[in-house]
Amino acid sequence: MLDNSFQSRYDRIPVATYTSTVMPGPQGTPFILMHHHREFEVLLITQGACRLEINREPLEAEQGDIVLIPPYALHSGSILPGRMFSHQCFCFDLALAGDEELTQMLESGCWDTTKKITPGSTGYEVVLDAVQQVYRQSSEQQPGWDLIARGQMSSLLGRLVQSKRIFSGKPNSKDVEFCIRVLQYLESHYAQEITSRDVAQEFSYTQSYFCRLFQENFGMPFQKYLCRFRLARVRLLLCEPETAVIEAAEQVGFHNASYFSRMFREEFGCTPAAFQHKRKSKKMQSEKK
């Protein structure tokens, strides 16, 4: 999916931060559903380890690693079994760097980036300092934070260029192109009653062939991914306190209230109403500061 939900957290400049901590479980737990977005994303693994896929290429990252995800790169992630996992990340619009060529080349895929920077590698400490500064300034938002964060993001990109961690890209594979086509279709039709047969017909595939390709590339059946896609969308709608839960569910394609509530609880650990109340309380506390 083209996931721009973090844009709702933009303030003075187009940068948004996110952090998560997940308790260990017996099986690998997904923490990023496959998606892509226009912004440049940076992850810092602060505890544990995870397995990522970026443009269908597997990558494992552990504590201390910095992961770079360029614009429009397909990416997903899961936590390794039996290990607690924490990470910090931020997404930002490359326009903040003020370099039109850099922005165009990265967004078009003509340039690519190193996907992982590990402790001890050349220039790691300098890049780590810039990453931590951007995350801290953008999260705490003390007076002048936007000026410091903007400068540190430009410094980060400059360091990546100097250390040759930004370089000429390569054409997308057939698997990546397939995923992008599917996500583009879902972006336009997810609120409708659609099945794998509908998408297969759109692509001129047999249903069985499409379902096999989808399972191989997305790691789950089509209907399960569609449900999670809709849940991600409705979660964004419920961040607005005035939005009615049932109305939000119907907007994204859920027409059975009990099924929607059950799926939401399984995905996010609480009911839709409880989630919305928590977001409303958090927003009120933030406004009082």
Image (spheres, helix red, strand yellow):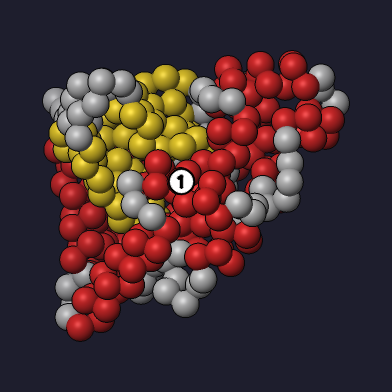
Residue 106 placement, left or right of 189: left
- Above or below, 109 against 211 in this view is below
Q: Position of residue 19 (x, y in %)?
A: 25, 49
Taking the spot 30% from the left edge, 52% from the top edge, the residue there is: 18
In depth, the one of 47 and 127 nearer the eye is 47
Q: Position of residue 239 (x, y in %)?
A: 42, 66
* Residue 240 shows in the view: yes
Q: Disc count in the image?
A: 1
Mark 1 = which residue? 262
- Above or below, 8 against 66 in this view is below
Q: Position of residue 231 (x, y in %)?
A: 50, 49
In depth, the one of 126 and 269 nearer the eye is 269
- Above or below, 144 against 111 in this view is below
Q: Residue furthest front?
A: 258
In depth, the one of 174 and 106 nearer the eye is 174
Taking the spot 27% from the left edge, 72% from the top edge, the residue there is: 281
Taking the spot 64% from the left edge, 54% from the top edge, the residue there is: 255
Residue 5 placement, left or right of 283: right
Residue 184 placement, left or right of 11: right
In depth, the one of 242 and 87 nearer the eye is 242
The C terminus: image quadrant = bottom left
Residue type (three-letter) at the residue carrying disc 1: Arg
* Residue 72 shows in the view: no
Q: Residue furthest bottom?
A: 288
Residue 197 placement, left or right of 178: right
Q: Within 10 Å of the Cα at label 1, are there few (<14), some (14-19), or many (20+) other Cα atoms?
A: some
Q: Position of residue 77 (x, y in %)?
A: 39, 31
Asked which secondary structure carries label 1, the reply is helix
Taking the spot 30% from the left edge, 56% from the top edge, the residue there is: 17
Q: Quadrant of residue 92?
A: bottom left
